[in-house]
Amino acid sequence: MNNIKFLLSANNLFNLPKDNGLEIAFFGRSNSGKSKAINALFDKKKISISSKKPGRTNFINVFIMNKKLRIIDLPGFGYSKISKKKSKIKYLLDDYFKSRKSLKILIILEDIRRSVSEFNEKLIYLSFNLKIPVLILLSKSDKINFEKRKKKLSLFKKYIEKTTHTKNIYIEVLTFSSISRDGILFTKKILNKWTNIKLFKLN
C-alpha cells in the first residue's frame, strides 16, 4: 500500500483536509532527517522534499494514501536562523496537536548523535495529552558505529521509561537511518500493527 502522493501544504488548519480518517504525523527538530525518513519508508525518492537548509519545512505538508489515510510532515523546530518564524510555527503546531482528532500516531525524529539530555521532554508530555502511540526514531544511525548505537538506544529507552512509568501510554524507540536502512523494516511492522491495516507490504 505504498501508493502515496503529495496533496497540499497548509499554513493554517483551515486549509487541511476534513478532520476524519487517520493521520500519521512526522515531527522533529530541524535537520533531524524527517523528510528523508518519509521518502525511505514509502520507497519514494522525492515524495517529501528535504532541504539542504534546516528548518525550511514551515508548512504542514499533507500526503495522501487513500481517502481515509494521510501522512503529515510537520514543520521542523529548533533552528536559530528561523527564530522570527518560530512563534508562528509553534502556534501552528499547537493548534494541530490540540484540535486534530484524526491524528492517531505521532512519529518523533531525533538525531542519534545528540545527548539524551537534549531531548525535548515537552514532546513526551505532549504524547500524554494526545493519548496516542508514539514512535521515536533515533535518526542518522549510520553516522555512528554499532556499539555506540546500542548504547544510545539503551540510554534513550531508560530515559523514556523513567519519564513515562506512571503514564498509560505506548512509546517505542528505534534506531533509524534512511541511508543504511537501519530500522526501516521494524518501523513498517510497528505502523502496520498500530494502524491495524496493511500499510506496508513486508517481504
Image (cartoon, grey):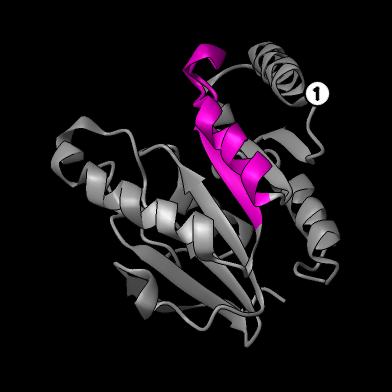
Counting from the top left corner in percent of width and height, residue 101 is at 61, 68
Counting from the top left corner in percent of width and height, residue 48 is at 43, 63
The reply to whether the magenta stretch includes residue 110 is: yes
Name the residue located 69 percent from the left edge and 47 percent from the top edge.
184
- Residue 162 lies left or right of residue 138; in this view the side is right
- Residue 108 lies left or right of residue 32; in this view the side is right
Which amino acid lies under the numbered mark 1 shown in the image of this protein?
His
* SS category of the residue bearing label 1: loop
Name the residue located 24 percent from the left edge and 42 percent from the top edge.
86
- Residue 104 lies left or right of residue 198; in this view the side is left
Q: Can residue 132 be seen in this view?
A: yes
Q: Is residue 181 visible?
A: no
Q: Measured along the vertical axis of the image, is residue 47 above or below residue 148? A: below
Q: Measured along the vertical axis of the image, is residue 59 above or below residue 2? A: above
- From the viewer's side, name the closer residue of 194 and 124: 124
The reply to whether the magenta stretch includes residue 155 is: no
**Quadrant in the picture for residue 180:** top right
- From the viewer's side, name the closer residue of 184 and 66: 66
Q: Measured along the vertical axis of the image, is residue 136 above or below residue 98? A: above
Counting from the top left corner in percent of width and height, residue 130 is at 64, 50
- From the viewer's side, name the closer residue of 163 and 60: 163
Counting from the top left corner in percent of width and height, residue 177 is at 58, 38
Q: Measured along the vertical axis of the image, is residue 191 above or below residue 62? A: above
Name the residue located 65 percent from the left edge and 15 percent from the top edge.
152
Report the residue marked by disc 1.
165
What's drawn in magenta, residue-wise? 105-130
Name the residue located 33 percent from the left edge and 47 percent from the top edge.
90
